[in-house]
């Protein structure tokens, strides 16, 4: 089977004037992987959205995180448009899959070479 890497990724949109970031936790849903370009649907999805104080590492402990399963679809579509306006769209997601898959292939080959030399008598 062909190895295709579909990593989760996080997008932070920072507004310096109020020292906050809007954070999107994104993933590739299983049913969208490998769909053709003739389909207009998004190949990635927003899993969670939250506000993060800029510069804080432990924000998840204190910030409210909204799971998009309970989000109104119109608002969800606006958030996807918000990301697309900033270059996070299907083109970006495709390029991320290509880059991640290439890296995964390199690591896989390296692993096999190391395995071969390890088990070689």
Image (cartoon, rainbow, N blue to C red):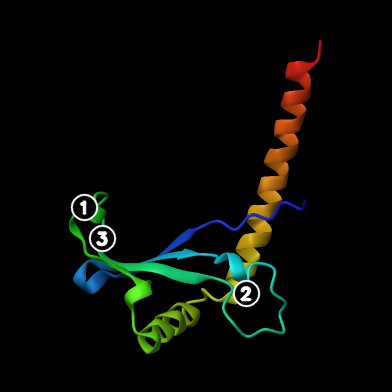
Residue 54 shows which numbered tag? 3
Q: Position of residue 16 (x, y in %)?
A: 26, 69
Along the line of sight, the residue nearer the viewer: 2 or 84: 2
Report the mark closest to the observer, 1 or 3: 1
Residue 8 position, x and y percent, is 50, 58
Mark 2, other Cα within 10 Å: few <14 / some 14–19 / many ≥20: few
Label 3's element?
loop
Label 2, label 1: how many angstroms apart (C-alpha)? 33 Å
Label 2 vs 1, first from the N-terminus: 1
Mark 1 nearby-residue class (10 Å; few <14, some 14–19, many ≥20):
few
Q: Marks 3 and 2: which is nearer the front? A: 2
| Rendered location of residue 38, percent (x, y) | 72, 84
* Depth check, front residue: 69 or 18: 69
Q: Mark 1 points at which residue?
A: 61
Q: What element carries label 2?
A: helix
Residue 22 shows in this picture: no
> Looking at the image, which residue is at 55% across and 56% down?
7
Classify 38 as above or below 58: below
SS of the residue at dot 1? helix
| Residue that mark 2 sits on | 91
Q: Quadrant of the C terminus?
A: top right
């Amino acid at each position: 089977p062909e190895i295709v890497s579909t990593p989760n990724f996080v997008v932070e949109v920072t507004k310096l004037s109020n020292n906050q970031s809007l954070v999107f936790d994104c993933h590739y849903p299983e049913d969208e992987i490998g769909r053709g370009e003739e389909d207009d649907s998004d190949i990635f999805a927003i899993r969670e959205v939250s506000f993060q104080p800029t510069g804080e590492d432990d924000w998840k402990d204190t910030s409210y995180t909204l799971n998009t399963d309970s989000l109104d679809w119109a608002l969800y579509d606006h958030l996807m448009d918000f990301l697309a306006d900033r270059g996070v769209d299907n083109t970006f997601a495709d390029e991320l899959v290509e880059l991640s898959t290439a890296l995964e292939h390199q690591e896989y080959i390296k692993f096999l070479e190391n395995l071969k030399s390890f088990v070689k008598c």
